[in-house]
Amino acid sequence: MMTQTNELQKPDDATLILRRVLNAPQELAFKVWTSPEHIQHWMQPEPGMTIPSAKMDVRVGGKFRIQMLNPDGEYFTAAGVFQEVQPPEKLVYSWDWEKDGSGEEFGELEGKTTQVTVEFIKRGERTEMIFMHTLFASVESRDSHSRGWGRIIDCLADFLEKA
């Protein structure tokens, strides 16, 4: 009789997978990831970057918009649509950048849509987060996002330690 093993999907040129055990209950980790008032405190893909605005309509078909501002005054605004919402376990959503993210409302997207899947797995009083970002156009784009998401997840873990 053969034994099957479940292997974690291996990243390809278009896939980024990050795993982290967070020192927080599953419900809190999910809430902090999806609440605009929390996002503004922990999301920091680069040192000195701030979040002037975050909007989250966390339901299937709902939109999100996260406006990031670097110390040089340049905006990087991400937006997308939730495709799957299973509180407090899983989120799947599209991710794209606005052409001009300096406004206060949803703007025109670049059209280079990728997909984000975030799973929150209960591990006693802690939560294992599996973050997967797919459909990158190039290895360079994936690697650039890897640095930003790695820092964001570090900031999230620090924020949850203090929560």
Image (cartoon, rainbow, N blue to C red):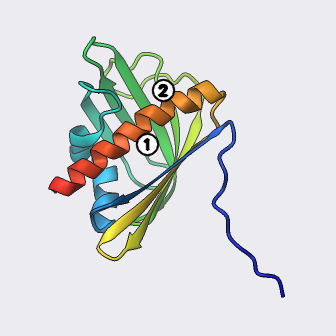
Tell me the quadrant of the picture where the N terminus can be found.
bottom right
What residue is pinned by disc 1? 63
Specify whether 53 is left or right of 30: left
Tell me the quadrant of the picture where the C terminus can be found.
bottom left
Point out the tag, 2 or 1, that comes first from the N-terminus.
Answer: 1
What residue is pinned by disc 2? 97
Specify whether 142 is left or right of 82: right
- Crowding near the residue tagged with mark 1, few <14, some 14–19, many ≥20 C-alpha atoms within 10 Å: some
Q: Residue at x 55, y 22 (%)?
A: 110
Helix, strand or loop at label 2? It is strand
Tell me which amino acid carries mark 1.
Lys
Of residue 92 and residue 162, the one placed in the foreground of this image is 162
Identity of the residue furthest to the bottom in this view: 1
Image coordinates of residue 50 in percent, x first then y, are: 24, 28
Asked whether the viewer can see residue 153, the reply is yes
Tell me which amino acid carries mark 2.
Trp
Q: Residue at x 48, y 26 (%)?
A: 97
Identity of the residue furthest to the top in this view: 72
Image coordinates of residue 127 in percent, x first then y, are: 36, 66
Disc marking residue 158: none
Helix, strand or loop at label 1? It is strand
Q: Where 74 sits versus 42, above or below?
A: above
